[in-house]
Amino acid sequence: MIRFRIDGVLHPVYQMPITVHNAMTARIKLLGRMDVVERRRPQDGRIKTRNPRGDEVEMRLSTLPTAFGEKMVMRIFDPDTTVKDLDALGFAPHDAQRWEGLVKRPHGIVLVTGPTGSGKTTTLYSTLKRIATEEVNVTTVEDPIEMIEPSFNQTQVQTQLDFGFAEGLRSLMRQDPDIIMVGEIRDLATAEMAVQAALTGHLVFSTLHTNDAPSAISRLMELGVPAYLINATVIGVLAQRLVRTLCKQCREPDGETARSALDDVVKPRKITGAWKPYRPVGCVDCRMTGFLGRMGLYELLTVSEAFKEKVTQEPGISQLRRQGIADGMRPLRLAGALRVAEGLTTIEEVLSATPPLE
């Protein structure tokens, strides 16, 4: 079975005999410089090809032995995705202005959080691409390097050589960087090196797997980073999710049902302005799904003096979340509700992708 993941949802496309499947995976493994004979252990590879416009596109390959043969996943990385502006990524003007302010700071830690497949890498690459001018040295440590970008110095983690994120960061500090991107903060050693980098005058970007923005502060504390170091270095946390956007060719206005559902989601908050909720229909352009493309929902927490006091005195999630909202943070579900009111997505998409409001 061959399935395409389009806008985050898998669609069955082809079904073929196992013999054809074996020959096809062997050919793809050969193109990806993988061991064609080895079928008992997982393997990774890469293929470079060109799209119909002639632009270079990279595909990352991953194989896994299963009960009925090898399973192969091909991830397509289009370089066009790294040059999106904030509006194309889905940032509302409210958050875009605050995000721009964060990435222009001379030093500190900026964290991007969310589950796998929520668009964290795209947000980071797009941001770094815009600030990576000839006057600054942008260096990354990744596992693996998602997309090759000539304007960065990219380093890949090699666990078999005892070269992890912490070791990579330690080496980077001697490379005269201005801006550092660490693929993920997984342990205390990496967190400590990121803190040291920020304290010595570097702007550090990294990712964490948490449900929302305030949880990133709690995760750092759970890893063992003291509250005073978090206050001294972390300047902002961006939590994000991806939701499918309605196809503009076939969407239809939705009535009172959507309005009442939207009211339930945003209670006790109110959405001002004209509401234009729509519902999906389905046409040839969107493959009869009613959706075409995806957009980001963002929850941006900026660290204020009042927030730092909460981290020191009352580092509970509820207190941190309330202070973040008081400082201008818009929760993910509320950000989604605003997109529903604008007619860009549906309430069902938002409810399935975002954590509930407290």
Image (cartoon, helix red, strand yellow):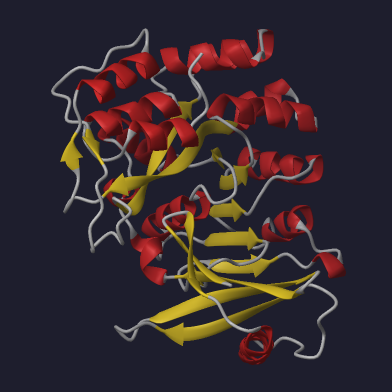
Q: Residue at x 61, y 67 (%)?
A: 145
The quarter of the picture where residue 242 lies is top left
Q: Nearer the viewer, residue 143 or 292?
A: 292
Q: Residue at x 34, y 49 (%)?
A: 89
Residue 258, horizontal then vertical, whole percent: 27, 25
Residue 172, horizontal then vertical, whole percent: 68, 59
Q: Residue at x 75, y 90 (%)?
A: 36
The quarter of the picture where residue 222 lies is top right
Q: Nearer the viewer, residue 13 or 347?
A: 13
Q: Is residue 102 above or below residue 3?
A: above
Asked if one can make out residue 319 in the rendered structure from this viewpoint, the answer is yes
Q: Is residue 99 above or below residue 257?
A: below
- Quarter holding the N terminus? bottom right
Q: Is residue 228 above or below residue 163?
A: above
Q: Nearer the viewer, residue 120 or 224?
A: 120
Side (left or right) of 203 relative to 64 = left
Residue 357, horizontal then vertical, whole percent: 48, 18
Side (left or right) of 298 relative to 46 = left
Residue 211, horizontal then vertical, whole percent: 59, 32
Asked if one can make out residue 309 in the rendered structure from this viewpoint, the answer is no
Q: Residue at x 65, y 45 (%)?
A: 197
The quarter of the picture where residue 254 lies is top left
